[in-house]
Image (cartoon, helix red, strand yellow):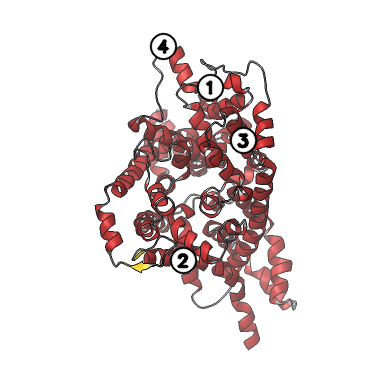
């Protein structure tokens, strides 16, 4: 009988997974907090500096600039992703062959390696040799410095983010839309509702859970973006597109200020956690429509 | 009308891909011509040939395949096993451990790269392909997918196997694993794709050119002075092809399948 109890526990099955989970997820978070209190350039011994990293961070105008850039980036990208993926979801919700084939074109960018995606867009928006400026000049406009102008550069990288994420979010909308019963629409038709009214008063409210998943997942994805910016602008011109994860990367691996970078990562991680908890709350409040 | 809008949008979405492919087929002279030509005047494989001959491409390919395949095998083992344990086991702190996995769903390499770098360095894995494999094999998204899937396996199957005298390991290998084929397929495909596409980990772990993965090599190529764009774009096309093939073969799994695994890590 005792043996049966041990056998049923099945604890051994979780051990290997949790060893890796501890080493590469929990330990980094613990270590990040500890390193935040030290000054360390990897080569010389670590030096305890108390709260100095954090007080320096508070005064570091470029760090806060990078946090602001991350927020700008996120809140510029998320509404556009939302509108485009909802539109695509509505247009492609049917299960016919045409819709199924077309979905592939929109979803595929999500599968493209971010490095390659950034490279492709950089070429598309190249000032002298890019297709976009070529078309603009053909139409009689001046060529635009898409990635060299501080304001435009952020918009350009946001465009790539939208391109990458919209198709994935479209699939969440399709799942959500397909779950809405036809009866609601039939009833509304009898009452003489227009298509727009049906969309506004039936579809959108019933998509509430999907809407929230799409928004929170988009925020989390955009806020931690690193690769697109690294490839397309390396944060430039100046600090115009230096997002927080990129700033932290530069402090750690260009300036070798490991302790300082850890303190910065901790702030970024805390912001990410706030977003993650928001997602959890939503998940507990209702079904997550296939997300997370 | 609806179809027209969809097709127009699809064309817009595919413009970057189109422009990359046509440009990659131009010769060096043609790619820097102003104004640019939409289609190559003369299709040239110059970019592809130069990049394969001069950039050590076969080695990058071998490195990337090694990392992606080995990681995928370990990932499947870890996630299936952990999912089974957490979904079907009975032990103290089970709920807490499940919660711990879920809390870390949003922790990705971009956010913890500094301490991750320190750990990888302490383990002696710097500038080694194992340094790209070992830290990445366990993913909270994969584990979460596995837990959800395992919950769907009816307890009666496990009970009746036990009544028939099967040991715990036999139940796992003869009952649970065969029932988990869809889970294993999904985990394998996602894991392979994310490891193939990975950039952040190679960027902080690898220093020497011999150990470069395809993505790291592509990023580095752009930082070098004087590399013509037709070669960079040819490289990009080659970096995309394997995942495109996998995506087209397993589209349904990617687009519907088990959706949690779709979250990028």
Mark toward the viewer: 4 or 3:
3
Q: CA distance from mark 4 to mark 1?
A: 27 Å
* Quadrant of res B84: bottom right
Q: Please say whether residue A252 is visible from this viewpoint.
A: yes
**Disc 2 and disc 3 on one polypeptide chain:** no
User: Mark 4 Cα within 10 Å, few/some/many (few <14, many 20+)?
Assistant: few
User: Which residue position holds label 3?
Assistant: B235
- Label 4 sits on a secondary structure element that is loop
Task: Choose mark 4 or mark 1, whichever is in front.
Answer: 4
Q: What is the secondary structure assignment of the residue under circle 1?
A: helix
State whether residue A172 is above or below residue B236: below
Secondary structure found at label 2: helix
Residue in the picture at 48% in, 60% down: B116
Do tag 4 and tag 1 residues touch (Cβ < 8 Å)? no
Camera-side residue of B119 and B19? B119
Residue bearing mark 1: B4
Q: Position of residue B176 (x, y in %)?
A: 68, 65
Q: Quick one: SS at disc 3?
A: helix
Which one is in front in this view, the residue at disc 3 or the one at disc 1?
3
> x and y percent of residue A60 in the render?
27, 51
């Amino acid at each position: 009988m005792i043996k049966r109890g041990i056998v049923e526990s099945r604890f051994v099955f979780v051990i290997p997974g949790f060893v890796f989970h501890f080493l590469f997820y929990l330990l980094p978070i613990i270590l990040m907090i500890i390193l935040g209190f030290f000054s360390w350039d990897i080569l010389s011994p670590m030096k305890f500096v108390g709260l100095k990293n954090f007080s320096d961070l508070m005064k570091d105008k470029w760090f806060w600039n990078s946090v602001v850039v991350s927020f700008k980036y996120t809140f510029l990208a998320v509404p556009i992703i939302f509108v485009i993926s909802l539109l695509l979801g509505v247009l492609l919700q049917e299960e016919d062959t045409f819709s199924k084939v077309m979905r592939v074109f929109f979803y595929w960018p999500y599968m493209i390696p971010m490095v390659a995606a950034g490279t492709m867009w950089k070429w598309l928006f190249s000032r002298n040799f890019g297709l976009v400026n070529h078309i603009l000049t053909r139409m009689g406009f001046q060529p635009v410095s898409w990635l060299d102008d501080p304001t435009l550069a952020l918009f350009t990288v946001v465009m790539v983010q939208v391109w990458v994420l919209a198709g994935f979010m479209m699939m969440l909308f399709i799942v959500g839309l397909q779950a809405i019963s036809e009866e609601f629409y039939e009833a509304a038709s009898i009452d003489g509702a227009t298509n727009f009214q049906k969309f506004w008063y039936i579809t959108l409210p019933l998509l509430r859970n999907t809407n929230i998943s799409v928004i929170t997942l988009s925020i989390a994805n955009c806020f931690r973006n690193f690769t697109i910016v690294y490839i397309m602008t390396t944060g430039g011109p100046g600090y115009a597109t230096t997002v927080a994860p990129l700033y932290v990367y530069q402090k750690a691996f260009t300036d070798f200020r490991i302790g300082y970078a850890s303190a910065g990562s901790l702030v970024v991680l805390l912001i990410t956690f706030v977003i993650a908890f928001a997602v959890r709350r939503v998940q507990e409040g209702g079904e997550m429509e296939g997300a997370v | 009308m609806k179809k027209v809008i969809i097709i127009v949008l699809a064309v817009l979405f595919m413009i970057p891909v189109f422009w990359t492919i046509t440009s990659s087929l131009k010769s060096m002279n043609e790619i820097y011509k102003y104004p640019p030509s939409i289609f190559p005047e003369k299709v040239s494989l110059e970019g592809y040939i130069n990049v394969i001959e001069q950039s050590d491409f076969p080695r990058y390919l071998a490195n990337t395949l090694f990392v992606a395949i080995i990681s995928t095998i370990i990932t499947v083992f870890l996630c299936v096993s952990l999912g089974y344990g957490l979904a079907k086991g009975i032990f103290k702190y089970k709920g807490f451990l499940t919660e711990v996995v879920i809390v870390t769903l949003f922790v990705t390499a971009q956010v913890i790269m500094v301490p991750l770098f320190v750990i990888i360095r302490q383990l002696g894995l710097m500038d080694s392909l194992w340094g790209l494999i070992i830290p990445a094999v366990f993913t909270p998204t994969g584990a979460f997918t596995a837990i959800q899937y395992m919950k769907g396996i009816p307890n009666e199957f496990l009970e009746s196997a036990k009544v028939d005298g099967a040991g715990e390991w036999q139940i796992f290998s003869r009952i649970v694993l065969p029932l988990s084929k869809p889970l294993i397929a999904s985990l394998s495909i996602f894991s392979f794709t994310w490891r193939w596409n990975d950039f952040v980990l190679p960027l902080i772990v690898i220093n020497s050119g011999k150990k470069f993965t395809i993505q790291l090599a592509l990023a580095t190529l752009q930082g070098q002075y004087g590399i013509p764009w037709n070669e960079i774009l040819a490289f990009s096309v080659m970096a995309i092809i394997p995942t495109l093939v996998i995506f087209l073969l397993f589209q349904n799994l990617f687009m519907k399948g088990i959706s949690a695994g779709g979250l990028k890590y």
